[in-house]
Each structure stands twice: as structure tokens, then as C-alpha cells.
Amino acid sequence: METVKTLISAEEIKKRVAELGKQISEDYKGKTLTAVCILKGGIIFTADLVRELSGETKLDFMEISSYGDSTVSSGTIKIARDVEYTIEGLDVLVIEDIIDTGRTLSNVMKHLLAQKPNSLRLATLLDKPDRRLVNDCIPDYVGFTIPDHFVVGYGLDYAQRYRNLPYIGILDLG
Ligand code: IMP
Ligand code: MG
């Protein structure tokens, strides 16, 4: 039977997201921040994080497909939805749920850099450095560094399920 064992509680996430929000607000003081949420996984983290930002903030979305319905990365990345407005000259913060092999973000960052933003940074809720295959994008803001487990909840899914869990848990397929 499939079970989910809590790894990071809702309270811990809330506390860490507030800390990150404070730090990002400081770093972007006096600037307009354009937050680019990577759908679908980044939606919950983005929704909570942008509400902790004190400066002027705009919001845009990209959707990337990289995983099928298993826990194994396909390695193929497709931009299913691109940002609505050009990011040329803007201060952009990409917000993602997790960096695993690094393939997705490597592609996303290259794609966005080509549009010549004034600055481009990356915030990820989770980082699984043990799994890294592509090392060309280092996150500027990390919520939690976790060991090599397949996790679900708080935006992260397994076959599109579990995204709504308020905590992050390790999935055991039983
Ligand atoms: P990467 O390209 O291997 O870095 O994969 C990143 C994407 O894979 C993330 O945006 C997630 O959608 C998905 N992913 C990687 N690890 C996990 C996990 O532990 N749980 C759920 N999704 C994951
Ligand atoms: Mg994702």
C-alpha cells in the first residue's frame, strides 16, 4: 500500500518560507521583482512565498513537462507554457518546487537568460544535491536540502496526486 511519511511539517515549511520571504525582500529592496512560478509543482510555494514579499512584485508562470507518471525522470523537457510578458530588463526570480537532476532548471534558466533580464535568480523549496547530473544552475534561495527520497506534497506530485498535502512527505510505494 502507498504511504506518505512526513519529512517536513506544515509548521516548518511556514517558518522557512517566511525567512526566505524576508531575505528576498531585503535583497530586492527598491526594485520591482518579477516572480516566475514553474507550474505545476511550484504553485503552492509561490503562493505562500509571494505573500511574504514586502516590495512591488509581479507574477508570471511557466509550465514545464519533464516527468511522466513515474518517479523516474524522462530527461526530456518541454516548455508547455512560456511567460506571458517579455522579461527583458526585468529582475526575475524563478520559483520552483525541487531541483533533482538539475535538467529542468538548467533549460529554464537558459531559456529565460536568452530574453536578457536585468537579473535572474532562482528560489527552490527543495534541493536534492545527491541526484544532480547537470550542475550549471545553482539556486540562490533554498528552502530545505533533502536526501535522495521521492517526496510529495506542498505542490509536489506522484502521478498528479498529493500536491494538496500541506506538508512534505516521503512516498513509499509499498
Ligand atoms: P530535474 O529536471 O531532474 O531537476 O527535475 C525537476 C522536476 O522533477 C521537478 O520540478 C519535479 O516536478 C520533479 N521531481 C523531482 N524530484 C521529485 C520528487 O522527489 N517528488 C516529486 N517530483 C519530483
Ligand atoms: Mg516541477
Image (tube, helix red, strand yellow):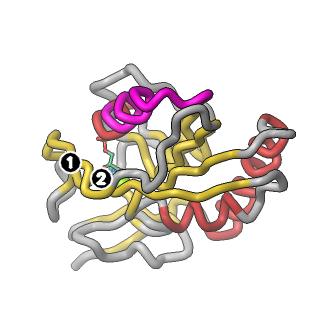
Relative to 69, 11 lies left or right? right
Image x and y of residue 33, in percent:
69, 45
Three-letter amino acid code of the residue under disc 1? Lys
- Residue at 54% x, 40% y: name it: 145
Give the quadrant of residue 28. top right
- Quarter of the image for the N terminus: give it: bottom left
Marks 1 and 2, the one that precedes in the sequence:
2
* SS label for mark 1: strand
Using the image as rendered, state which of residue 35 and residue 136 is in the foreground: 35
Question: Which residue is labeled 2 in the image?
Answer: 64
Q: Is residue 112 magenta?
A: yes
Instruction: Quote the CA–CA distance across marks 1 and 2.
Output: 6 Å
Q: Is residue 137 visible?
A: yes
* SS label for mark 2: strand
Relative to 127, 80 lies left or right? left
Label 1 neighbour load within 10 Å: few <14, some 14-19, many 20+: few
Q: Are marks 1 and 2 in contact (CB under 8 Å)?
A: yes
Question: Which residue is labeled 1 in the image?
Answer: 78
Image x and y of residue 17, in percent:
70, 56
Give the quadrant of residue 120. top right
Residue numbers of the magenta segment: 107-119
- Quarter of the image for the C terminus: give it: bottom left
Label 2 neighbour load within 10 Å: few <14, some 14-19, many 20+: many
Q: Does ligand 2 reach within 8 Å of label 2's beta carbon? A: yes
